[in-house]
Amino acid sequence: MEPSLTTHLSNKDEVSNVNQLVNKLAKSTVGQGDVGRTVLKVPKGTRDRNPFQMKVLEDVFGTIIRCFKRHDAVTIDTPVFELKEVLTGKYGEDSKLIYDLQDQGGELLSLRYDLTVPFARYVAMHKIKTIKRYQIGKVYRRDQPAMTRGRYREFYQCDFDIAGEYGPMLADVECLRIVYEILSELALGDFIIKINHRRLLDGLFKACNVPTEKFTATCSAVDKLDKSPWCEVERELCEEKGLPQETVDQIGKYVQLTGGVDLVDSLEADSRLMEQESAQVALSDIRLLLSYCDSLGISDRVRFDLSLARGLDYYTGLIYEAVLTGFTYDPKNTHSLDTSNSVTNNIESPSKQLPKSSKKKWKQNKSTNHAELDDSVAPVTSVEHLAVGSVAGGGRYDGLVGMFDPSGTPVPCVGVSFGVERLLAISEAVASTRSEKLSSVQRPTETEVMVAGAHKGLIIQRLECCRRLWDAKIKATFSHKNHPKLLDQLQYCESTGIPLAVILGDGELARGVVKLRVVSSRAEREVAYDAVVDEIRKELVNLQTY
Amino acid sequence: MEPSLTTHLSNKDEVSNVNQLVNKLAKSTVGQGDVGRTVLKVPKGTRDRNPFQMKVLEDVFGTIIRCFKRHDAVTIDTPVFELKEVLTGKYGEDSKLIYDLQDQGGELLSLRYDLTVPFARYVAMHKIKTIKRYQIGKVYRRDQPAMTRGRYREFYQCDFDIAGEYGPMLADVECLRIVYEILSELALGDFIIKINHRRLLDGLFKACNVPTEKFTATCSAVDKLDKSPWCEVERELCEEKGLPQETVDQIGKYVQLTGGVDLVDSLEADSRLMEQESAQVALSDIRLLLSYCDSLGISDRVRFDLSLARGLDYYTGLIYEAVLTGFTYDPKNTHSLDTSNSVTNNIESPSKQLPKSSKKKWKQNKSTNHAELDDSVAPVTSVEHLAVGSVAGGGRYDGLVGMFDPSGTPVPCVGVSFGVERLLAISEAVASTRSEKLSSVQRPTETEVMVAGAHKGLIIQRLECCRRLWDAKIKATFSHKNHPKLLDQLQYCESTGIPLAVILGDGELARGVVKLRVVSSRAEREVAYDAVVDEIRKELVNLQTY
């Protein structure tokens, strides 16, 4: 772990290329094929992922999973659909976005909306008292798709949760450390982790004389402060929610505050707020958490932010959300859909394998705004650093497992969910840019050797050579054509990044030798056929060394 | 690759334990929790996977993916649901098993039934001419669940397919080699790969005077020969399908034949069959394929079997199916559901982490029946070696992509799909048995170090120590309790297999040292706190060496 505070995307050209590519990749292979072929499309809000995108996904998921495993987590799997009643009453207004399966006789089923409710159902059903688990899977929301912003109807979530009766804020701070490690390691520029507390919001609304029945509505209006300026939220609170102007002014004074321990100090000096017991408890939690953040070395990324509210009903304590501050999104810069970047394993058209450049829609922020982190208790009036939206969010939900276990004791939980689609879109852009700069292909395969024929035929000979290599666990391939051209076989190596080729010929085979070619240098030498496995292994070590 | 012909489960005790466990694990965490809590269950035919099962899944999928990558394959991802019309007309009678989503306004959607049709849609939509891809994902079938036999409504498939216009049987034989490598490496005992050809069945039925309109019905009756004896299939063909006894007798003579090249020879000497052009073409394909199987060293696992028919409509050429011959299933040996093996990360109840022994329902066959492979042209009259059912199957489907591309050229395809649920159930049993024999825990985590406190408190100190370790990418954990007992912390290490513990104490910390404990030997030594990372790394190397 290198907890560097500087963005990892510092090279200017690289940044510019990234910006050009993010937009395209965020939309790639979305939606439909040609007009006129009605059946040739994927459902609205879903997409295919091509081999290059899958390579990035493997790398990003690998980083995330390694972090989860570093923190002693197990993993579980749950079905993609649940009994409809399991999801009922867990998502508030968003319940309308749940996909139901058709009643074909039997149970009423719904596609999972997140991984948290199925996890709580799992914990209750299997009578688990403590578990630290991660889970990666697709979830489903019948939302209005905004695929250019990475919002899909089918999308991956990566969740990490800790269930169990523990010391206050100890499991919570490990979740924040997880966010810190993963976003640092993915190296997608700067980020901040905003924290707040549900019970502080409760106390704050009460202190501002919001009627109890309007807490939820007030909460969801305040939550929009990451995308809208205060004046719009203010108007919504007055006009739509019907709160008195004086109450709204008081709310506005609070929810625009951000900071660190100093903010806890100043709020604890606020006698009207401190009359609310829930606010006292919450501020004591936040103070403890911030001290634990110091111990784990993540304080400079964590910001206490009173505007953070989060939509879901089930949160009961600490809430948090991580935001990349290195990118902004420009919705005016829209371009037509480009579905031409499908990637094939085409030996005839190796050029298809190269990613293409793209249009500009995202830009990376010049300043990385660390100053802001010290600029405590300053009102947030601009949205420019937040426009990419949250890439991870979570909180404490102590009541959810108990909802599935009417007889038993509740199991307190805290967790975090990574919205990996945005992380993937940006990572794809970064990967493509880097591979262009290095003039090397971002390889979706790991193949080490091409078994090629120098002339017509040699089918049996090529198969027998492949057999030797596969038996030795060497990653090898051959052309499935009966009479492939040598040039085509070598071009396939160059376009897909296969480093070595074994070239078979009748003359050489008669002498018990084959040619071993290093694709990058085009250097060829004869090796004894019986030694080909060892020679390949030596050459692979050489290539890794230089 | 070690193409060993002997079963890897040769130890008698081990085999017995495996047999006891297979049944339990095949059913574990299936279905419901306690009676009376209606909501506490998963949908019929689905299940959760606990951390031990996920560990086995990771290992099995890892083996499979390594093999796919060794063969130059890329991977793609497609949505879990498709437009309903994409799936329509692809599965014959089985279409009734497709899950439809409720019409909530907008498109009509269905859950994918397999990964093959979405792959063909992908190839057509993205105008791909050649690709070699693998894909692992869940598929959905509203079948009558038989979870004790590994038949679920939601289950994983692992598919490998090669699309492109190639020399005959070259892509096909690579698919067979893939099956051979994966089943050999998983080491689940002996297996055979049965092959046949759709066009041979066509010619054969025609030669036997089956009316063309009854080909499909005849085919599906013949396909049952892997589970039913010939007399039952004979009855079905006569009584239900209405074929004349003479025709059925002729069919019976053919479809009970199995063998190798000798069977090709004898069929090519059958003048009535050879009047059918499709039979000529098919036999020439099979002869070529068998010679390629020799070149790839897999002939002793491949058996030409005229009873193999396979259900799906889209096959056009070679078809194949792999069967484990080391296990049989005893349906009479049924036991009550046991849902108690949920696994937790419970520091208080570490014993929960141990797999429990189970009841007997499967048994491993004593003889591994290699003789049979040489016993060509012998009718199969017994089903005992086939009862586990197929663990992989596939074939050539040259017309499917074209169904999505009315204007364009067809893209020939051949592929194989692994029915991994059965492989997982058996692997789980093997893993549990082995861990019991070795008296070591089959670990679902990879954690290397527990940061423990020797006495009360030490919260900040434990956090700071974890920070050092996580910063150094060491896999570390700590108790989330404020005042955990040392004994509990050490027991957690023993029960979950964590090899090392760092023990903090006020006295030691004041002297700048900590205790480093090797859990297995209980040996403790003091190390300088500043050197703890290096000392842990040394100790981990030591533990791996011995």
Image (spheres, coloured by chain):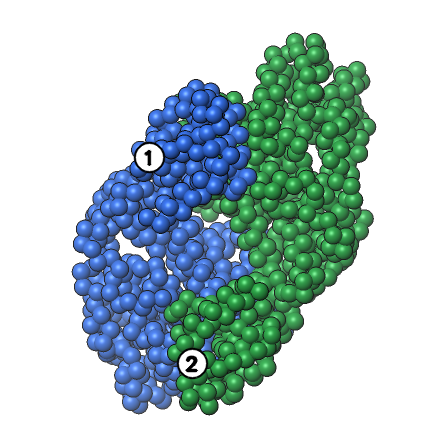
Chain colours: A blue, B green
Question: At which x and y percent is residue B407?
Answer: 40, 22
Question: At which x and y percent is residue B269?
Answer: 70, 12
Could you classify mark 2 by the number of other residues whose Cα lies within 10 Å: few (under 14), some (14-19), or many (20 or more)? some
Say which residue appears at 44% left-offset and 22% top-offset. A507
Question: At which x and y percent is residue B80?
Answer: 49, 45
Q: Nearer the viewer, residue B268 or A41?
A: B268
Question: Looking at the picture, which amino acid does disc 2 mark?
Answer: Ala
Position of A289 relative to B373 (above/below): below
Give the CA distance from mark 1 to mark 2.
52 Å
Say which residue appears at 21% left-offset and 76% top-offset. A375
Q: Nearer the viewer, residue B321 or B50?
A: B321
Dividing the picture into quadrants, the one containing residue A96 is: bottom left
Left or right of residue B293: residue A2 = left
Picture quarter with the N terminus of chain A: bottom left
Confirm whether residue A505 shows in the render.
Answer: yes
Could you classify mark 1 by the number of other residues whose Cα lies within 10 Å: few (under 14), some (14-19), or many (20 or more)? few
Q: Nearer the viewer, residue B285 or A396?
A: B285
Number of the label disc, if any, that sits on residue B528: 2
Q: Secondary structure at mark 1?
A: strand
Confirm whether residue A402 shows in the render.
Answer: no
CB within 8 Å, label 1 to label 2:
no
Q: Which residue is mark 1?
A: A523
Q: For mark 2, name the chain.
A: B
Left or right of residue A397: residue A341 = left
Left or right of residue B268: residue A420 = left
Question: Looking at the picture, which amino acid does disc 1 mark?
Answer: Ala
